[in-house]
Amino acid sequence: MERTALVLGAGGITGVAWQLGLLIGLAQQGLDLTRADLIVGTSAGAITGALVAAGHDPAAAAAMEAPLGPGDPRIRADWTRGAVAFQLLQDPSLPPAELRRRIGTIALEAEVGPPEPWLASFARRLPIDRFPDRLLVTAVDTATGEPAFWTAASGVPLVPAVAASCAVPCLFPPMPVNGGRYMDGGVRSRTNADLATGYDRVVVLAPRIPMLQRDTPATGTLIEPDPAAQSAIGGNVFDPSRWPAVVEAATHQGATHPLPW
């Protein structure tokens, strides 16, 4: 029997909306990728992946509470340190391990507030009892720069794992997981698609983000936002007001996109 992998990349709040909408549209054509044998989630993709791997229908998940409310923490970006981290991401001469170590140091120093309020916010948006069996969540250890790949067998709680995968350096605090502090899995790769090596069918849903980011080779089918979806996303991937328009545009894209098989 052929094995299928769904790879969900980084892309902010609008990235989650686009991935859910695309899954809705593809399902309208008869392709239900939520049934994949492996679901790899990085940053935004970790949220999408956790929801669909746990059995949540993408249409129902798309109705989730996207905007931050009074009970959520306020984003307190450290733009000074963030600019340094951004410059490092643009430097192709740095070995990947060294790049991740340097960004990890910056992420730990960034003045962005404590992680606890964000963990509570993620817990509210992920009503999932346990780590889904098919899910693999990516993150990066801020102390060593080493990537972390968590599954149900890793003994890591789901909410801290997903929050860590989403912890964009200098925008969100690194998250505590089993005694360490972890940051966005997108620091290693915007998709981490190489983790699906060996699967017969691989579909990579990769929202575009407004920065140069290293990537890992993707085998199989790569889908990115089409012009209409990109217009709906706009220039700020953390703008929750764009959620409905992005879901709508992505659903249309998925419903009309050529099927990979």
Image (cartoon, rainbow, N blue to C red):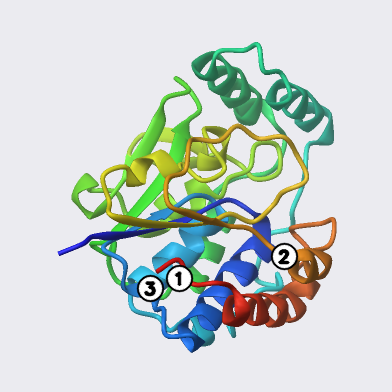
Residue that numbered label 2 is attached to: 226
Q: Amino acid at mark 1?
A: Leu
Asked if residue 218 lies left or right of residue 99, the reply is left
Q: Earlier in the sequence, mark 2 or mark 3?
A: 3
* Residue 80 vertical position relative to residue 178 in the rendered view, above or below: above
Q: Residue at x 36, y 58 (%)?
A: 158
Q: Residue at x 63, y 71 (%)?
A: 17
Position of the C terminus by quadrant: bottom left
Q: Earlier in the sequence, mark 2 or mark 1?
A: 1
Element class at badge 2: loop
Q: Residue at x 64, y 61 (%)?
A: 15
Q: Residue at x 57, y 43 (%)?
A: 190
Residue that numbered label 3 is attached to: 34
* Residue 198 vertical position relative to residue 107 in the rendered view, above or below: below
Nearer to the camera, 71 or 44: 44
Q: Amino acid at mark 2?
A: Asp
* Residue 138 vertical position relative to residue 127 in the rendered view, above or below: above
Image mark count: 3
Residue 92 is labelled as none
Q: Amino acid at mark 3?
A: Thr
Q: CB atoms at circles 2 and 3 under 8 Å apart?
A: no
Instruction: Report the mark closest to the observer, 2 or 3.
Output: 2
